Amino acid sequence: RPVAGVEVKVVDDSGREVPGGDAGEIITRGPHVMKGYFRKPEATAARIRDRWLFTGDIGRREADGYYYHLGRRDDMIITGGLNVYPGEVEAMVYQHASVQEAIVFAIPDGKRGHVIGAAVVPRPGATIVEKDLLTFLRANLANFKVPQRIMIRQSLPRTSSGKTIREAAVLLSDDSGGS
């Protein structure tokens, strides 16, 4: 929920607020919003409109008043004309008891544009059985959001600061070290 003095909305591509429960871009305004990018008026104009900061984050507002972050606009995967937010799929993968870490990414596909891929790391002492993980995901996600390919890894690619690199994860789908 927003803190006092901060406004938050979820809007469509035209900047119109979307109905509760629908996904859109999270925008915010208040004293926390920057005045702009240093010496970059074009970048500022693209992000700040009418004092609203367009965050590039995709989310939804539920009836309980809470906002839920689904992922970054730049990370959205279009598969067969349908939008999939990797963060939403990752959140469900993390619900599986054997999963320590996960990253979801797009794999190019000639027929659908992209299909969903996932790289997962098991918890210490646990074993991930791909079939069991897929059964779990199919029971909890829309079919088009279930990864077509799951790679089980000992670790995920990271930046020097420790952040998982989604773009590098797709390269994992091309090597032969997975299951």
Image: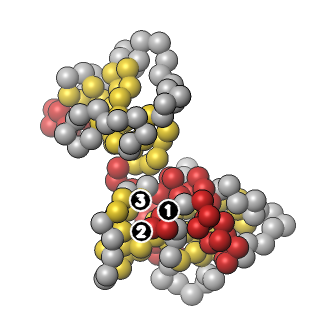
Q: Position of residue 61 (x, y in %)?
A: 44, 34
Tag 3: residue type?
A: Val
Q: Is residue 169 visible?
A: no
Q: Amino acid at mark 2?
A: Ala
* Quadrant holding the C terminus: bottom right
Q: 65 or 76, which is in the foreground?
A: 65
Using the numbered discs, state the Cα–Cα distance from disc 1 to disc 2 in whole angstroms: 17 Å
Q: Residues within 10 Å of mark 3 (few under 14, many from 20)?
A: many
Residue at mark 1 to residue at mark 3: CA–CA distance: 10 Å
Choose the circle earlier in sequence order: 2 or 3: 3
In this figure, which residue is indicated by the disc labeled 1?
142
Badge 2: few (under 14), some or many (20 or more) residues near its Cα, within 10 Å? many
Question: Which residue lies at the image location 35% right of the left edge and 29% below the top edge?
Answer: 9
Dot 1 and dot 2 residues touching (CB under 8 Å):
no
N-terminal-most mark, 1 or 3: 3
Q: Secondary structure at mark 2?
A: strand
Cβ atoms under marks 2 and 3 closer than 8 Å? no
Q: Which of the two marks, 2 or 3, is nearer to us in this view?
A: 3
User: Which callout, 1 or 2, points to the residue nearer the camera?
Assistant: 1
Counting from the top left corner in percent of width and height, residue 125 is at 84, 67
Across and down, in percent, residue 166 comes to 47, 61
Tell me if 154 is positioned left or right of 18 in this view.
Answer: right
Residue at which label 2 appears: 106
Q: Which residue is mark 3?
A: 84
Tell me: 176 left or right of 10. right
